[in-house]
Image (spheres, rainbow, N blue to C red):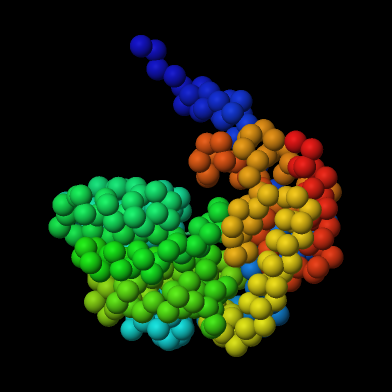
Amino acid sequence: MRKLSLDTYLRKKLENRQTQNRFRYRLSSSSACDAEMVVEGRNVVNFSSNDYLGLANHSEVVQALSEGGKKLGVGSGASHLISGHHEVHKALEQQIAILTGRPRALFFANGYMANMGTLGAMLSDEDLIFSDELNHASLIDGCRLSRAKCVRFEHANYLDLQEKLSSLKFRHSVVVTDGVFSMDGDTAPLKEISEICSKSGAWLMVDDAHGFGVLGRNGGGLVEMMGLDCEQVPILVGTFGKSVGTYGAFVAGSDALIESLIQFSRTYIYTTALPPALAHATSISLKIVEAEPWRRERLADNIKYFRSGALSEGLRLPQSDTPIQPILIGNDERVADLGSLLLDRGFLVGAIRPPTVPVGSGRLRVSISAKHSYEQLDALISVLCELTLND
Ligand SMILES: *Cc1c(COP(=O)(O)O)cnc(C)c1O
């Protein structure tokens, strides 16, 4: 058989994606991440970022980064185990451990690597991973890196999990779930899942990328809100690129867990340590997260305001008490069109299509921030009604 050239092969794949209406475009912004931004030269209200508390462009955080840079330079120069580990990395880890109520924490390059590297370090091909079917892609890739067999359970269905755990034999097993689900905004039934895990001897890992900073009295996330300790949720992952407004991630847990990750986690060991200045800025931002609960209150109020306004105007919103408010559309072409129509009207809203979400469940994903005003929320609701209610 004649072999296709690389470009012919790739062009075919690209055309296929285009005819499916799943082609993705990158919009470029020319301003800092904030409630109002300039995107592709247009002024827009940003309903598409994960900067839920408005910290990505906060003056004290920006100042911490620039002062950190002046004092400590930009690059860390090496991986953590060679010479890239800095006092400020260590201080940040202690701060995370205290905030999450765990004995120790480890600062990772990002959430993707934290998830991959944690599953990869703990399990091997004789083990099982039980994974919620709507878990983030990085957890699915973590299953692949670990070579453990992955069993999916129905979304947030702990009875299905229980049945699968009791019908399968395993040596070691990790049950893994998002805390707040990234495309739906609903939360995992962690109390039930944690009880099922302790009965069956499976270890529970929670990825709370979207709950950390936003939920819980001090911003410790879903586990803080539900009062789950290190025994109930032994492996906790959180990220800093979302509500904390910086970059990076952490795993928090026992001393044995963290020490094992330092020894065995490939995505921790074989990568350059994040810039110390960034760790410093993250530390300052985390202090604001803890010390200014009014940001969480303001956000919760905006979420309530958006939901009640949208529902009373006839928009259909699935249950979600978090900043992630999806509006299900279905048809992929329609989702993409709505995304650009909204942009034309001055609103940046995520148009999410498969394979990011299951086929047939394309959606607009509205992300609410503490920085949005009631006027901005009202304006979005009215445009959403105009564009979607005649479908
Ligand atoms: C965003 C996200 C990640 C990835 O985190 P990064 O720091 O952006 O790599 C992992 N898990 C979930 C649930 C996420 O939403």
Residue 20 falls left or right of residue 368 = left
Residue 125 at x, y percent in the picture = 19, 50
- Camera sees residue 264: no
Q: Nearer the viewer, residue 25 or 138?
A: 138
Number of numbered discs overlaid on the protein picture = 0
Residue at the image point whose x is 21% and y is 63% from the top: 200
Q: Is residue 9 left or right of residue 369?
A: left
In the foreground, 295 or 286: 295
Residue found at x 64% / y 34%? 331
Q: Position of residue 45 (x, y in %)?
A: 78, 59
Residue 209's spot in the image, x, y percent?
A: 49, 65
Residue plotted at (39% across, 48% down) = 154
> What is the residue that sits farthest to the top in this orientation?
1
Provide residue 143's location: percent of width, then percent of height: 32, 51
Horizontal side of 92 relative to 203 (left or right) equals right
Q: Quadrant of residue 360?
A: top right
Q: Could you tell whether 191 is left or right of 371 in the image?
A: left
Q: Is residue 150 above or below residue 287?
A: above
Q: Residue shown at 23%/59% (left/top)?
A: 173
Residue 348 versus residue 172: which sits nearer the camera? 172
Q: Is residue 283 above or below residue 222?
A: below
Q: Nearer the viewer, residue 323 or 89?
A: 323
Query: In the picture, which quadrant includes the C terminus?
Result: top right
Q: Picture quarter containing residue 247? A: bottom right
**Residue 377 makes an appearance in the image:** yes
The N terminus sits in image quarter: top left
